[in-house]
């Protein structure tokens, strides 16, 4: 699994931009942010999947105890299943895009006045 070096080097606003275009499947504003989204994608799916498994465990516990909360747990788990499917779909879309050249680690993200491939 990839480390999050490029993603961690981004500013808070850039991270928000990465999350915005990752979850909406928009095109990346720059190749560096695209690379950061490629790093972020597997981790997002893993965390959404972990929460989904926890919700399933709690739902099964409520069903086993014949609790009235079981219906609510089942609804939340089913909605989270849709979220997990969306996270996996977004990861698939990001992985399907052809990778672009990325600037050196630590270089500025601004492409103004720089080479065309930035």
Image (cartoon, rainbow, N blue to C red):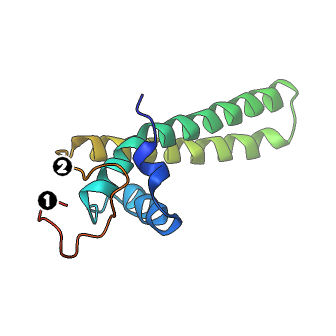
Q: Quadrant of residue 80?
A: top right
Is 118 left or right of 72, judged from the image as shown?
left
N-term-proximal mark, 2 vs 1:
2
Q: Of residues 79 and 32, which is closer to you in this image?
A: 32
Give percent across and percent down for residue 40. Answer: 44, 45
How many other residues sit within 10 Å of disc 1, few (<14), some (14-19) or many (≥20)?
Answer: few
The extreme bottom residue here reads 112
Residue drawn at (70%, 33%) of the image: 54
Residue 40 visible in the current orientation: no
Residue drawn at (43%, 47%) of the image: 86
19 vs 85: above or below: below
Q: Which residue is mark 1?
A: 117
The Cα–Cα distance between marks 2 and 1, rounded to whole angstroms, is 7 Å
Residue 32 visible in the current orientation: yes
What is the number of the mark on residue 81?
A: none
Number of labels in the image equals: 2
Q: Of residues 30 and 58, which is closer to you in this image?
A: 30
Give percent across and percent down for residue 81. Answer: 54, 41
Give percent across and percent down for residue 43. Answer: 49, 38
In the structure shown, which secondary structural element does the residue marked by tag 1 occupy? Answer: loop
Is 64 left or right of 111, judged from the image as shown?
right
The extreme top residue here reads 64
How many other residues sit within 10 Å of disc 2, few (<14), some (14-19) or many (≥20)?
Answer: few
Q: Where does the N terminus fall, quadrant-wise?
A: top left
Q: Quadrant of residue 65?
A: top right
Q: Which residue is mark 2?
A: 101
Is 70 left or right of 83, judged from the image as shown?
right
Is mark 2 in CB contact (under 8 Å) with mark 1?
yes
Q: Where does the C terminus fall, quadrant-wise?
A: bottom left
Residue drawn at (18%, 75%) of the image: 113
């Amino acid at each position: 699994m990839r480390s999050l070096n490029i993603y961690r080097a981004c500013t808070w606003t850039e991270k928000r931009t990465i999350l915005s275009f990752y979850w909406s499947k928009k095109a990346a504003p720059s190749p560096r942010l695209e690379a950061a989204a490629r790093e972020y994608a597997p981790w997002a799916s893993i965390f959404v999947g972990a929460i989904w498994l926890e919700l399933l465990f709690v739902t099964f516990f409520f069903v086993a105890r014949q609790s009235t909360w079981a219906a609510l747990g089942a609804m939340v788990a089913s909605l989270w299943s849709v979220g997990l499917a969306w996270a996996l779909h977004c990861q698939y879309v990001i992985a399907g895009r052809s990778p672009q050249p990325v600037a050196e680690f630590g270089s500025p993200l601004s492409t103004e006045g720089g080479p065309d491939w930035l």
